[in-house]
Image: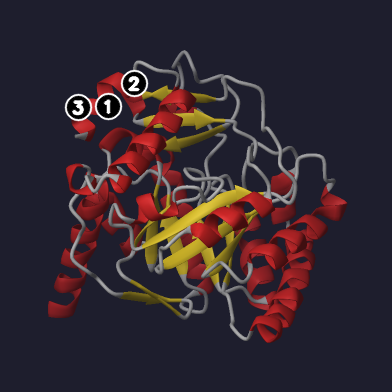
Amino acid sequence: MYALARPLLFCLDAERAHDLGLIGIESAYRTGLNALLATRPAPLPTRAFGLEFANPVGLAAGLDKNGAHVDALAALGFGFVEVGTVTPRPQPGNPKPRMFRLPEHQAVINRMGFNNDGVDALVRNVERARYDGVLGINIGKNKDTPNARAADDYLACLERVYARASYVTVNISSPNTQGLRDLQGEEALKRLIGTLRDAQERLTVQHGRYRPMLLKIAPDLTEAEQDGIAEALLQVGVDGLICTNTTIDRDAIAGHPLAQEGGGLSGRPVFARSTAVLRGMAERLGDRIPLVGVGGILGGDDAAAKIRAGAALVQCYTGLVFRGPELIGECVEAIRTLRTHADAA
């Protein structure tokens, strides 16, 4: 079905197509027509940061910012779903147009700017969902909150979503909120994660259940910056690391008419960069912190490459734009094959 719908969607503005795509997925779910979108993969149980996943292929944050389509998206066969990024207060994001497709490169540029309805709205949506699988909630800070007060925003979101999330992701790597990536610096990161870890301990006692906390980092990191992040995470502790967000580098699309558009570049052009960071962090962290590989997964081979680079789990987003929901099962099967060969070796 997606093969038929894609040409029509690609005739539309990218953000409009995104919204209509979600409406279509929701409609298929509500009318029992999910099988026309994708065949659910056979289970491939996976364990990471203390959680059990039906399979290791998840939905990355950004597609469902407000957690309004959790059931419909989960029904496509994902092993886990991550919603957000959500901020304490609603915000409209950056001016439109702010999303652009580059079909020649199987890529998307977006400068959405954490557009969302606020954390209270997301929590209400999640509370209505019937999904009982692994749900991640990705949290950020409001655009007008200075970095000196960033911890206040992350704390507000963490406290609000804690009871409803299976895990919480701290997003300090979007290129579309000015200054946000400065929080990846070693000392700033130690302070932020240390504060959130203290809150995590308090919330564990309050709710009687531990919720893992993950960090999502950028692909545009030097070796020294990766060293600093690894050192900070090993000192203050974190349950998982997502590698990576979108890139601001344009080398892979140099000469394209849209190359000068501001925002994060995702899809095929970020694959090599994000996988290099994934591999680098795996070398630095060893098996002490589980990793999630995301960035440029357009087929099963890409998902398997992320696993070989050190990921325990993978996530997709832009690949769904170009491949549709069939990508999910293809990735699961590629990882299943990789495991089978590893077990036989």
| Three-letter amino acid code at the position of disc 2 | Phe
Q: Residue at x 75, y 72 (%)?
A: 194
Depth check, front residue: 166 or 278? 166
Q: Position of residue 298 (x, y in %)?
A: 29, 42
Q: Badge 1 is on which residue?
A: 6
Tell me the CA gap for discs 2 and 1: 6 Å
| Three-letter amino acid code at the position of disc 1 | Arg
User: Going from the N terminus, do you reach mark 2 or mark 3 first?
Assistant: 3
Residue neighbourhood size for the residue with mark 2, other residues' Cα within 10 Å, grouped as few (<14), some (14–19), many (≥20): some
Q: Badge 3 is on which residue?
A: 4
- Can residue 172 be seen here? no
Q: Position of residue 165 (x, y in %)?
A: 55, 67
Q: Residue furthest left?
A: 344
Q: Badge 2 is on which residue?
A: 10
Depth check, front residue: 341 or 9? 9
| Element class at badge 3 | helix
Asked if 264 appears above or below 236 in the picture, the reply is above
Does residue 171 appear to the left or right of 342 in the view shown?
A: right
| Three-letter amino acid code at the position of disc 3 | Leu
